[in-house]
């Protein structure tokens, strides 16, 4: 018998209410979405192999993706709740809403794939394989959408100073930095 999963959640990402910057939280969620994308891609790859051991690896990977997707969806929900408490971030909340939907779709697809891969019939196995590919496509979309949601980082004033286009000192430094080192042993 399997033990029931604990309902207590551990958030891996600081919430905006804890003082973290929303952009930083979104970057962390984006990094985790890319990990989930890589996991579902690997599960899709291994599940398509002929050897049973490799298909078992794909099944294990999609089982891992279920947990990752559940945690990511819960953290995106938590971010949305903490943003909802701040009335000034209504625009950000509107951008987060589709991410929540996509994260829950991804979790449902991964969970369904895991369920069907555990079945004995070949038809159920094929359905599980299709669901892995669906979860992978959703993970790719979620990672890209999270990347697009993060506002661009601004450079400090020291980086944005005017550069004289005919500055000979700068030209020499750039030329020295871009000159390749001589190859050793080359004739």
Image: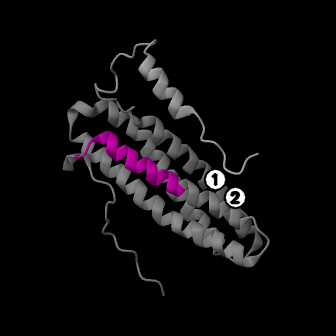
Image spot of residue 24 (x, y percent):
33, 44
Q: Quadrant of residue 92?
A: top left
Nearest to the observer: residue 14 or residue 78: 14
Residues at badges 1 and 2 in contact (C-beta under 8 Å)?
yes
Element at label 1: helix
Element at label 2: helix
Nearest to the observer: residue 178 or residue 91: 178
Q: Residues within 10 Å of mark 2 (few under 14, many from 20)?
A: some
Using the numbered discs, state the Cα–Cα distance from disc 1 to disc 2 in whole angstroms.
6 Å
Residue drawn at the location 33% of the way across and 20% of the way down? 161
Residue farthest along the front direction in this orientation? 187
- Horizontal side, residue 11 vs residue 187: left or right: left
Question: Colour scheme in the image?
Answer: one colour
Nearest to the observer: residue 119 or residue 60: 60
Q: Is residue 31 magenta?
A: yes
Q: Looking at the picture, does residue 158 appear above or below residue 119?
A: above
> Mark number for residue 134?
1
> Mark number for residue 9?
none
* Magenta highlight range: 20-36
Residue drawn at the location 35% of the way across and 16% of the way down? 162
Image spot of residue 93 (x, y percent):
33, 36
Image spot of residue 31 (x, y percent):
45, 51
Q: Is residue 176 magenta?
A: no
Quadrant of the drawing holding the C terminus: top right
Q: Which residue is mark 2?
A: 130
Residue farthest along the bottom direction in this orientation? 1
Residue drawn at the location 64% of the way across and 73% of the way down? 57
Q: Quadrant of residue 3?
A: bottom left
Magenta span: helix, strand or loop, mainly? helix
């Amino acid at each position: 018998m399997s033990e029931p999963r604990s309902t207590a959640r551990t958030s891996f990402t600081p919430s905006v209410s804890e003082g973290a910057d929303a952009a930083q939280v979104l970057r962390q969620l984006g990094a985790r979405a890319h990990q989930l994308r890589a996991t579902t891609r690997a599960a899709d790859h291994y599940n398509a192999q002929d050897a049973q051991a490799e298909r078992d690896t794909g099944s294990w990977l999609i089982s891992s993706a279920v947990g990752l997707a559940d945690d990511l969806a819960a953290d995106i929900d938590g971010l949305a709740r903490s943003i909802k408490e701040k009335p000034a971030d209504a625009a950000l909340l509107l951008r987060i809403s589709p991410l929540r939907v996509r994260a829950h779709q991804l979790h449902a697809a991964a969970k369904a794939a895991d369920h069907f891969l555990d079945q004995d019939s070949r038809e159920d196995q094929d359905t599980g394989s299709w669901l892995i590919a669906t979860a992978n496509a959703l993970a790719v979309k979620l990672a890209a959408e999270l990347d697009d949601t993060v506002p661009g980082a601004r450079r400090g004033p020291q980086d944005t100073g005017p550069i004289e286009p005919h500055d000979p000192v700068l030209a020499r430094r750039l030329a020295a930095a871009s000159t390749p080192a001589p190859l050793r042993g080359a004739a």
